[in-house]
Amino acid sequence: MSSLQDQLLKAGLADKKQAQKAKKERHKQVKAKQQNKKAVIEDAAKTAAEQARIAKQQKDRELAAQQRELKQQKEIKAQVINLIKVNAQPKNNGDVVLNFTDNNKVKRLYVSERTHKDVTAAKLAIVSYQDNEYELVPLPVADKIQTRMPQAVIYIANTASENRAQADADDDWYADYDIPDDLMW
């Protein structure tokens, strides 16, 4: 079976020039379609590459933020440890038992009587930066530690309201007595 072009040439309805011109036209059309497909494929590839680049940048930003957060937490922990080590007060040097709670468990330290009074008067606080290792630090240092790492502060005596109530009671014991106006010294 011959092509339509061959049949037209045999019948004399078309000449060789017209046949070559038609063949070139078809070839140009096929070539244009192929180039158009390549352009579409290249555009799709460029779009996919751009989306992958944007996704990678977003992932890198999130990873960098996580790393900054971890670094900041390590710095804060190092600051807290430094504060505790520099300001630690002597402990385990007495025979007075200091009881306190940590995670609903009663813990105890043996301290001197003076240290025990300071802890109960809220002048010293109990802090910890490791499990089952407790240190005594002054209250201003404990406040700094609490702003950085609240879980490190184990015990601060809450005696401000108790002290006021006791002071008021101490002041009222003589309220029943009359004070003369003409006291001479």
Image: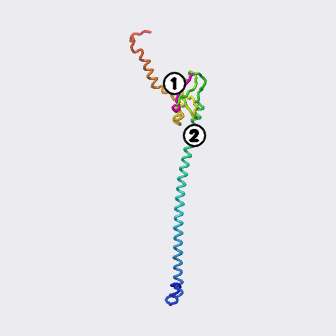
Q: Quadrant of the C terminus?
A: top left
> Residue 16's x, y, as percent?
54, 87
- Label for residue 77? none
Where in the figure is residue 129, as x and y percent of width and height? 57, 34
User: In this rendering, which labeled residue sits more in front, label 1 or label 2?
Assistant: 1
Picture residue at 43% right of the left edge, 19% below the top = 169
Q: Residue at x 51, y 29 (%)?
A: 156
User: What kind of element bears circle 1?
Assistant: helix
Q: Quadrant of residue 164?
A: top left
Residue 167 against residue 136 in the figure, above or below = above
| Nearer the observer, 50 or 1 | 1
Within the magenta stretch, is there residue 175?
no
* Image spot of residue 147 (x, y percent): 51, 35
SS under mark 2: helix
97 is within the stretch colored magenta: yes
Name above or below for residue 7 compared with residue 158.
Answer: below
The residue singled out by tag 2 in the image is: 75
Q: Which residues are magenta?
A: 96-104
**Which secondary structure class fits the magenta region best?**
strand
Q: Earlier in the sequence, mark 1 or mark 2?
A: 2
Identified by mark 1, the residue type is Thr
Mark sitting on residue 120: 1
- Say how the picture is coloured: rainbow
Q: What amino acid does circle 2 point to?
A: Glu
